[in-house]
Image (cartoon, coloured by chain):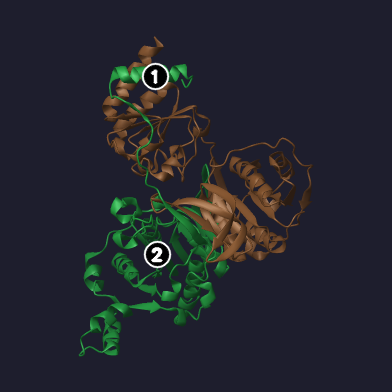
């Protein structure tokens, strides 16, 4: 194994790996290549060997597997203790976590214990030589994220600590199976429960597979705070229905209660790459753009001709949604005839 | 009877950033932003107050920040906190989440025994959700993040409903525990008029020092004594008080550094303008059909 390792914590829910982990492995493969290093998956769970094997499809060189009945469900204490020990022993250069509820619970705990730098909700990760305060640092991880209400994009580095950590939301990185996977090589790590691991017990767990799958929708009609009311969102639903697409919203629209949180597009929601994205009454803060700017075609509808959303759109319509949307629906129906 | 410590933070109101707030070099002029009580921390305080209402005990709110951050401590008193502490020192400036959690954990150790630490899930200026878990780790206690509801507290254990991806969990955890609370979990109670009257004059040492400036008749020690007797003195914990390791505080103790900041000012753009008319939109739809978008 090389010295420069990139690790990805592989999250599993009820024995199923989370998509975000495979997305991170795909990105991790590229990062590892750039630092002439190796990619390692860390799988913690019960009967999870299959998951560890699956990670090799995404270019993993070696996997750590910690398998124990007590580890079937994610719990902060044992999971963080396991990672703390592994990281202290092997000192990887980069450790990536999905910015899921579990990942955002676990990563800070591990960073705190190992005194590592950690950047949350990155929208891009790169490797670059950096000159910082007059000192040269080769091959640092650039952790890029919007900040301050989206008015700035910050590049964060952790130059003086050995382990660089970041969390990334689901859908931000693309999942790429590897053409020539390495041979499966799994190292099993034993787990020895201690008292502190048992302080918290899970009494019940309820999970519903989300019926909403924005990531897979070819057409998305998204509304923002500018729509002004839940009533106006009905027009979006109508347009989405006619076009055979899904309805989504910006964070502001979710916060205002116009639409449910599982339909939020953006840095703290879902990242989508549809064929067509219609942004209605969305001003276009960078957190939102981070979640949709890779759509193939973008149409913006907004009353404000200076709204930033127009800058990343292919087509722009300046106008009131309550007038433009019915026109859109009519025109589309007419074309179908 | 339970003792709760609540971690609260004053944050710039990033939801209402205007062009004026951005400096020409692309950085944010914090002084131009109104400072507000981070909402989820208020929800955390509400959780702590409800525990007190139901089971008795006390609620202590603490904040780390510049002197003006004590504004929100007064608000904690208005809501019902029994005691508040400002954790403030120039040495703490520029702290990232790791350095912040170190200082907070040392302050909590100094304040004493507790059953619960409550905090908002995250603060709106960074949205990292890291300080809670990092503090719990440094204190060596378990954590429950994304809490939605307290079901019960009995036999030294708390039962909580917490959010997970795609659902929720009911967990039972031994005390002491750190709990981070979600926005919708509880409605923070309004300030009580009586408490506003009682505490609006509460002052930190820095506030009192300002009062003595240019007034030779006011002695800081007398003033401090007077405010303490009237229960209006907000205690400040400094680096010296906490006997912290300076190399783990502030910028020095922060592994993450801001390497580059780019302002997001977009100008122009090459989009095609479509008139808001049925004909123009019809044409656009025709074009998209040709491109096989539909």
Rendered green, the chain in question is B
Q: Residue furthest front?
A: A134
Q: Name the front one of labels 1 and 2.
A: 1
What is the count of numbered marks? Answer: 2
Q: Which residue does the image show at 44% across and 67% down from the upper left?
A: B94
Rendered brown, the chain in question is A
Can residue A196 be seen? yes
Quarter that holds the C terminus of chain A? top left
Residue A211 at x, y = what percent? 50, 32
Quarter that holds the N terminus of chain A? bottom right
Q: Which residue is mark 2?
A: B8
- The answer to whether residue B156 is above or below residue A219 is below
Can residue B141 be seen? no
Chain of the residue under the numbered disc 1 shown in the image: B
Density class for disc 2 (Cα within 10 Å; few <14, some 14-19, many ≥20) is: many
Q: Which residue is mark 1?
A: B285
Q: Is residue B258 left or right of residue B194?
A: right
Residue A11 at x, y = what percent? 62, 47
Q: Residue furthest top?
A: A337
Chain of the residue under the numbered disc 2 shown in the image: B
Q: Are marks 1 and 2 on the same chain?
A: yes
Q: Which residue does the image show at 31% across and 35% down from the upper left?
A: A230
- The answer to whether residue B183 is above or below residue B247 is above
* Label 1, label 2: how far apart the Cα atoms are: 51 Å
Tag of residue A228: none
Q: Which residue does the image show at 37% across and 46% down from the upper left?
A: B265
- The answer to whether residue B79 is above or below residue A11 is below
């Amino acid at each position: 194994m090389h010295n420069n390792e990139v690790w990805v914590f592989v999250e599993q829910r009820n024995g199923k790996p989370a998509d975000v982990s495979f997305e991170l492995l795909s990105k991790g493969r590229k990062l590892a290549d750039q630092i002439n290093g190796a990619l390692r998956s860390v799988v913690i769970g019960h009967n999870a060997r299959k998951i560890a094997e699956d990670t090799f499809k995404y270019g993993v060189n070696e996997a750590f597997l910690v398998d124990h009945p007590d580890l079937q469900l994610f719990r902060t204490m044992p999971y963080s203790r396991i990672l703390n020990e592994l990281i202290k022993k092997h000192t990887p250069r980069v450790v990536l976590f999905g910015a899921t509820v579990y990942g955002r619970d676990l990563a800070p705990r591990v960073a705190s214990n190992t005194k590592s730098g950690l950047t949350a909700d990155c929208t891009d990760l790169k490797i670059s030589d950096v000159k910082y305060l007059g000192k040269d640092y080769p091959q640092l991880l650039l952790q890029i994220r919007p900040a301050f209400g989206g008015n700035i994009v910050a590049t964060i580095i952790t130059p003086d600590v050995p382990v660089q950590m970041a969390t990334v939301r689901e859908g931000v990185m693309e999942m790429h199976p590897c053409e020539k996977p390495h041979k499966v090589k799994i190292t099993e790590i034993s787990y020895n429960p201690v008292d502190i691991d048992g302080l918290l017990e899970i009494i019940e767990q309820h999970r519903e597979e989300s019926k909403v799958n924005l990531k897979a929708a070819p057409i998305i009609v998204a509304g923002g705070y500018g729509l002004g009311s839940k009533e106006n969102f009905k027009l979006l639903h109508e347009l989405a229905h006619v076009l055979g697409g899904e309805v989504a919203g910006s964070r502001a629209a979710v916060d205002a209660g116009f639409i449910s949180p599982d339909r939020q597009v953006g840095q703290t929601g879902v990242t989508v790459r549809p064929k067509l994205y219609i942004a209605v009454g969305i001003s276009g803060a960078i957190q939102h753009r981070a979640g949709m700017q890779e759509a193939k075609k973008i149409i913006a509808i907004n009353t404000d001709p200076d709204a930033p959303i127009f800058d990343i759109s292919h087509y722009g319509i300046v106008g009131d949604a309550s007038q433009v949307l019915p026109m859109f629906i009519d025109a589309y129906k007419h074309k179908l005839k | 009877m339970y003792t709760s410590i609540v971690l609260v933070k004053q944050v710039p109101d990033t939801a209402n950033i205007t062009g004026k707030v951005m400096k020409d070099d692309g950085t944010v002029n914090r002084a131009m932003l109104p400072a507000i009580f981070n909402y989820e921390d208020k929800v955390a305080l509400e959780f702590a107050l409800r525990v007190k209402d139901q089971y008795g005990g006390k609620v202590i709110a603490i904040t780390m920040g510049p002197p003006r951050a004590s504004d929100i401590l007064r608000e904690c008193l208005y809501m019902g906190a029994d005691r508040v502490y400002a954790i403030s020192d120039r040495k703490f400036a520029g702290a990232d989440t790791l350095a912040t959690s170190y200082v907070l954990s040392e302050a909590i150790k100094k304040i004493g025994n507790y059953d619960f630490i409550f905090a908002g899930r995250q603060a709106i200026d960074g949205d990292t959700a890291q300080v809670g878990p990092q503090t719990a780790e440094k204190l060596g206690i378990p954590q429950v993040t994304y809490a939605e509801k307290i079901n019960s507290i009995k036999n030294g254990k708390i039962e909580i409903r917490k959010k997970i991806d795609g659902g929720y969990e009911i967990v039972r955890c031994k005390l002491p525990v750190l709990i981070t609370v979600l926005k919708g979990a509880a409605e923070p109670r309004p300030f009580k008029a009586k408490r506003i009257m009682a505490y609006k004059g509460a002052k930190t040492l820095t506030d009192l020092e300002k009062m003595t400036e240019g007034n030779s008749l006011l002695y800081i020690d007398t003033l401090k004594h007077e405010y303490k007797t009237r229960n209006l003195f907000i205690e400040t914990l400094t680096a010296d008080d906490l006997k912290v390791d300076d190399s783990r505080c502030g910028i020095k103790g922060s592994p993450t550094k801001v390497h580059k900041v780019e302002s997001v000012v977009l100008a122009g753009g090459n989009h095609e303008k479509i008139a808001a008319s049925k004909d123009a939109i019809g044409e656009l739809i025709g074009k998209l059909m040709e491109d096989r978008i539909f």
